[in-house]
Image (cartoon, helix red, strand yellow):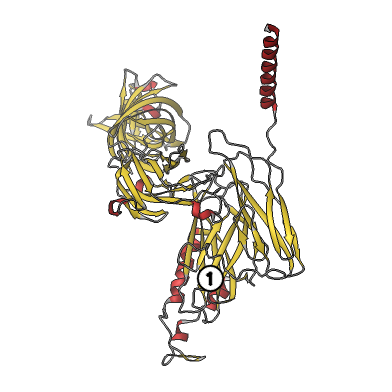
């Protein structure tokens, strides 16, 4: 009996060890395995399913899953996992699949288009439009299959429609797309392919402006057009000029644009274009940055308004439907006021198998921001606020704490993405958009916010950190001061560059209003006193003559006159502001004379041989000028007192020269702008 138990124990340990070794040594699934499409075709009806590589779960993240985007090759599309599509006409169609790996650490699966041949129309295709595409009331809208990730392809869907009632005429116009914002140094996107299905064609900007009728065309006598009596409703005579101004503003914001001509858009009809955009590897890799596509729909009919739609996208390192973003996250501290509003957006999606009744979005508020200034801008799902809701009504509650905010959707129905019968993935998503202001004490330091999203009583889903940062900025500060030489050094032992100086003028360049260690560069022009030094005295008496008169030379004095201007350069200077009023720094300085003029002067004292009167005669030699001929190096430490970040302050600097043991104090005033 004992041996059986021992044998059983060894077997279990061996199995466990074998399993552990196998689990540890199993190689990860290669993320370059292409996606395949399984197409079940019945004449003009196709049932499609994707065959994808196993997911590679990100540790600590919710369960990984795929989302799907299908192009059927006839202008229709689907986000379903296994769509069923009926083609309206016979022909050959290119079926495309774009699968996105959420909470997966690999690359998105790639696939090639698959050709579908329809030879016979057996089934009647639906005449319905993609009515769930347009979430706003406009005539143009854009959507992407996934957020931009450097080095990955994404598809932009441009939808446009004619909202005129049935029976109205067809509509012509133009579509304009702007992308690659100038605020980023490198381009973010490259338009690789455009797939159109309704005769859209490339259009030039000149042709688009020519398409817009001149104002005079609609100021004819009466209310008649070329086609006969017809009242012109609400024609804006400045429409063309206003449109030109809008285009100019867009071109100042974006680097790239594309224009397409649209014709014969029937009343009530919706049409779609598909753009393959390569997200360039060299694009800004800041996963908190928000980039924008801006689209415009320009009807030819002057009675119809020109409409715009902006699509904001967050750059991601991996695909996650739950995220937080801050628009315009890089700010100029010089122009930021305490009343400036920051706009945050938290997006969430129920990826579960059932609906969520309660969704709680808890947001961390950085200490630099004031939670009491929170203002709700927009949210989804739409519902009333809880302070005006009746019992058990769907509502949104806002709970404000000192360092956090909670947005709680109560008594709602948010479907799960894996729930049976859910075909619209947008119905599983929601968002919170809010504004918040800075606190009174605004520091130039990076700050971040983060959200935790709880669906019912499940574990919280933690979003990315959304950082806000200030640009370094440049501060140029004029300096004026005076040097005091210390010690008992003789003037004869000092080089001209370290003599006592009356005036020192300079300028400093540093980051604007720093709150951390920072680098400061300085340059000074030192104006020295004109010095006259007695070099020798000759007391030997001798006779001489000046003109017709005779004199006796009593003595001669020889002087050296020196005029020096030097330049101090501070290439190494590290500073730190202890608080608003005191800052300290250490650094190194190099000194050179940029102008060193030397001349000699002789004064002769003569006695008149006739009357014994004393006379003085003076002669001088031309000066010699040398530049950059005297160099010196020094170390220093100093302290500033005053408004040391922005404004005036007083500095006290101790300087120690290296070549010659000379100490010097520099007292100066500085004003940082």
Query: In x, y percent, where is residue 420?
Result: 56, 51
Quadrant for the C terminus in the image:
top left
Residue 189 position by quadrant: bottom right
Residue at 72% x, 56% y is 39
Q: Which residue sits furthest front?
A: 1
Quadrant housing the N terminus: top right
**Percent x, y of residue 343:** 39, 50
From this view, report whether residue 11 is shown above or below residue 81: above
Q: Residue 586, relative to residue 277: is it above or below?
A: above
Q: Is residue 588 above or below residue 318?
A: above
Residue at x 46% of width, y 76% of height:
304
Query: Where does the image place residue 520, in percent across and percent down from the top left?
Result: 41, 35
Left-right relation of 218 to 403: right
Q: Secondary structure at mark 1?
A: strand
584 w.r.t. 414: above or below: above
Q: Nearer the viewer, residue 509 or 453?
A: 453
Q: Position of residue 260 (x, y in %)?
A: 59, 69
Q: Is residue 402 visible?
A: yes
Which residue corresponds to mark 1?
Answer: 161
Q: Residues within 10 Å of mark 1 (few under 14, many from 20)?
A: many
Q: Quadrant of residue 574?
A: top left
Name the residue at 43% across, 42% down. Answer: 456
Specify whether residue 341 is in view: no
Question: What residue sits 71% from the left and 43% below the top?
Answer: 33
187 to the left or right of 651? right
């Amino acid at each position: 009996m004992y041996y059986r138990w021992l044998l059983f124990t060894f077997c279990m340990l061996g199995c466990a060890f074998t399993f552990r070794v196998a689990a540890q040594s199993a190689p990860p699934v290669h993320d370059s395995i292409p996606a395949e499409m399984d197409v079940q075709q019945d004449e003009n009806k196709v049932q499609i399913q994707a065959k994808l590589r196993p997911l590679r779960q990100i540790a600590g993240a919710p369960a990984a899953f795929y989302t799907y985007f299908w192009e059927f090759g006839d202008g229709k599309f689907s986000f379903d996992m296994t769509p069923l599509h009926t083609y309206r006409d016979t022909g050959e169609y290119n079926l495309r699949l774009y699968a996105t790996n959420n909470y997966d650490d690999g690359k998105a699966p790639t696939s090639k288009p698959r050709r579908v041949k329809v030879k016979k129309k057996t089934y009647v295709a639906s005449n319905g439009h993609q009515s769930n595409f347009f979430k706003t009331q406009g005539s143009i809208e854009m959507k992407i299959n996934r957020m931009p990730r450097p080095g990955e392809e994404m598809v932009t869907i441009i939808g446009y429609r004619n909202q005129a009632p049935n029976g109205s005429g067809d509509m012509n116009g133009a579509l304009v797309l702007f992308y690659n914002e100038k605020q980023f140094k490198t381009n973010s996107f490259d338009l690789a392919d455009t797939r159109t299905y309704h005769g859209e064609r490339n259009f030039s900007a000149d042709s688009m402006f020519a398409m817009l009728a001149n104002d005079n065309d609609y100021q004819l006598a009466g209310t008649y057009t070329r086609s006969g009596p017809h009242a012109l409703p609400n024609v804006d005579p400045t429409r063309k000029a206003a449109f030109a101004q809008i285009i100019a503003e867009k071109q100042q914001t974006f680097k790239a644009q594309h224009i397409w001509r649209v014709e014969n858009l029937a009343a009530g009809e919706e049409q779609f274009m598909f753009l393959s955009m390569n997200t360039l590897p060299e694009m800004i890799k800041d996963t908190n940055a928000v980039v924008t596509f801006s689209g415009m729909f320009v009807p030819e009919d002057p009675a119809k308004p020109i409409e715009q739609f902006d699509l904001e996208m967050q750059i991601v390192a991996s695909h996650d439907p739950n995220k937080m973003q801050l628009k315009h996250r890089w700010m100029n501290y010089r122009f930021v006021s305490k009343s400036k509003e920051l706009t945050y957006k938290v997006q969430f999606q129920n990826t579960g198998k059932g609906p969520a009744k309660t969704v709680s979005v808890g947001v961390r508020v950085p200490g630099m921001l004031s939670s009491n200034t929170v203002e709700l801008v927009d949210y989804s799902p739409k519902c009333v606020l809880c302070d005006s809701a009746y019992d058990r009504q769907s509502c949104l509650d806002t709970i404000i704490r000192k360092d956090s905010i909670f947005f709680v959707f109560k008594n709602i129905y948010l479907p799960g993405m894996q729930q049976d019968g859910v075909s619209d993935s947008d119905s599983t998503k929601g968002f919170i958009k809010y504004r918040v202001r800075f606190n009174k004490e605004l520091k130039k330091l990076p700050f971040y916010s983060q959200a935790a999203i709880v669906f019912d009583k499940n574990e919280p889903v933690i979003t990315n950190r959304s950082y806000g940062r200030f640009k370094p900025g440049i501060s140029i500060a004029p300096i004026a001061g005076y040097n005091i030489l210390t010690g008992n050094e003789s003037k004869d032992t000092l080089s001209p560059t370290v003599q006592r100086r009356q005036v020192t003028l300079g300028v400093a360049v540093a980051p604007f209003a720093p709150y951390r260690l920072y680098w400061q560069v300085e340059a000074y022009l030192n104006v020295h006193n004109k010095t006259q030094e007695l070099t020798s005295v000759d007391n030997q008496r001798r006779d001489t003559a000046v003109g017709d008169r005779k004199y006796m030379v009593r003595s001669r004095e020889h002087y050296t006159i020196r005029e020096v201007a030097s330049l101090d350069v501070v290439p190494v200077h590290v500073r730190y502001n202890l608080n608003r009023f005191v800052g300290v720094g250490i650094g190194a300085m190099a000194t050179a004379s940029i102008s060193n003029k030397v001349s000699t002067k002789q004064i002769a004292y003569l006695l008149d041989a006739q009357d014994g009167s004393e006379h003085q005669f003076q002669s001088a030699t031309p000066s010699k000028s040398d530049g950059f001929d005297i160099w010196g190096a020094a170390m220093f430490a100093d302290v500033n007192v005053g408004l040391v970040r922005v404004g005036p302050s007083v500095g006290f600097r101790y300087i120690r020269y290296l070549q010659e043991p000379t100490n010097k104090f520099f007292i100066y005033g500085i004003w940082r702008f």
